[in-house]
């Protein structure tokens, strides 16, 4: 029965539009927030209506999109604990078709406060169901751990995209995440599909990076995006200015990498 269910999930179609994508990796420092910021911005630049949701208490996606996280009146924290409606938490960004639900350190307390809440795993989903039809893409930046925040993101999402740094422990962390996704599929969100892997912080000059990439390709029967996000100084600098890379340095390697990733995701066929 379990094998049949695995096969069923593997064959499920990925929607092209009106898609909620959770960016997840249980290992930190892999370019997850950087990907959330810049993929969202590039999708918006391409004319798509985009909502970015920062589910990480560090609030890196929030500050990286130019919003002062400690001055936000209604963040994802207020939304989850029921102090505001989702419309009140949506912040318009410079591109009129790009919106944000921000995060800050207050979110770290949400798991304890929601401990006895009924159906706490579906709080985000219940809010998103009200407005998801207004967006072509909803991009959720998950925290680098499996907690109630990550579970809320995965129960809300249609697909999971995994930014993967080309380093020694990459496969180990990926195996853990795949198992988590499988559990969510079986118990909470049957429609969840593994979107694929995108390699980040890639340095083709090192043998290790190339070996890890080949190792993942040899061992993973899931989608691996053709686009590779290369190590790039300008890409690393952009968050400190509160700007996506396409605004900070539109002609940089990082900007072109993320534009290519956005094109590849937009071109995803339903198979």
Image (cartoon, rainbow, N blue to C red):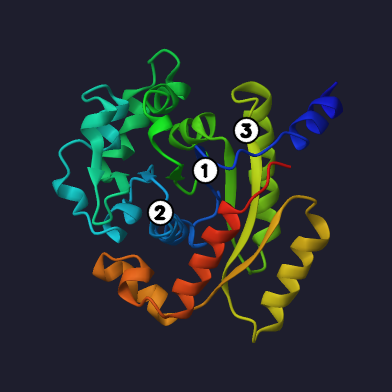
Residue that label 2 marks: 47
The local secondary structure at tag 1 comes to strand
Observer-nearest residue: 104 or 244? 244
Q: Residue 158: where, in percent of width, then height?
A: 57, 35
Pointers 1 and 2 in contact (C-beta within 8 Å): no
Q: Is residue 72 left or right of residue 201?
A: left
Determine which residue is flagged by label 3.
Answer: 192
The first of marks 1 and 2 along the sequence is: 1
Q: Label 1: which residue?
A: 21
Q: Residue at x 56, y 52 (%)?
A: 266
Q: Residue at x 75, y 50 (%)?
A: 222
Mark 2 → mark 3, Cα distance in angstroms: 26 Å
Q: Nearer the viewer, residue 234 or 258?
A: 258
Which structural element holds mark 2?
A: loop
Res 201 → quadrant: bottom right
- Residue 152, horizontal then vertical, whole percent: 46, 31
Left or right of residue 126, residue 163 in this image: right
Q: Position of residue 256 (x, y in %)?
A: 49, 73
Q: Tell whether label 3 touches label 1 (CB within 8 Å).
A: no
- Alpha-carbon neighbours of circle 1 within 10 Å: few (<14), some, or many (≥20)? many
Q: Can you say whether 219 is above or below 154 in the image?
A: below
CA neighbours of label 3 inside 10 A, class few (<14), some (14 to 19), many (20+): many
Q: What is the crowding at mark 2: few (fewer than 14 residues within 10 Å), some, or many (at least 20)?
A: some
Work out how far the residue at label 1 is from the one at label 3, CA to CA, in angstroms: 10 Å
Say above or below: 210 vs 19: below
How far is the residue under mark 1 from the one under mark 2? 18 Å
Residue projecting furthest to the top: 118
């Amino acid at each position: 029965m379990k094998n049949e269910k695995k096969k069923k999930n593997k064959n499920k179609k990925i929607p092209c539009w009106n898609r909620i994508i959770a960016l997840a990796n249980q290992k930190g420092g892999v370019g997850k927030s950087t990907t959330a910021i810049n993929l969202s911005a590039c999708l918006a630049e391409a004319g798509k209506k985009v909502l970015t949701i920062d589910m990480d208490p560090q609030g890196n996606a929030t500050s990286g999109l130019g919003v002062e996280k400690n001055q936000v009146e209604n963040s994802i924290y207020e939304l989850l604990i029921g102090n505001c409606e989702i419309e009140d938490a949506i912040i318009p960004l410079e591109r009129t078709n790009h919106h944000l639900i921000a995060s800050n350190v207050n979110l770290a307390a949400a798991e304890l406060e929601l401990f006895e809440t009924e159906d706490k795993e579906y709080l985000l989903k219940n809010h998103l169901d009200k407005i998801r039809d207004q967006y072509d893409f909803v991009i959720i930046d998950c925290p680098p751990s499996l907690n109630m925040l990550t579970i809320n993101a995965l129960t809300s999402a249609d697909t999971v995209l995994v930014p993967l740094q080309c380093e020694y422990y990459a496969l180990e962390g990926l195996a853990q995440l795949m198992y988590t996704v499988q559990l969510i599929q079986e118990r909470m969100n049957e429609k969840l599909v593994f979107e694929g892997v995108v390699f980040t912080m890639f340095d083709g000059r090192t043998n290790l990076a190339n070996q890890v990439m080949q190792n993942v390709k040899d061992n993973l029967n899931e989608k691996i995006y053709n686009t590779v996000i290369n190590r790039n100084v300008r890409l690393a600098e952009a968050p400190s200015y509160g700007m996506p890379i396409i605004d900070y340095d539109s002609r940089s390697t990082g900007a072109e990498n993320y534009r290519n990733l956005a094109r590849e995701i937009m071109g995803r066929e339903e198979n």
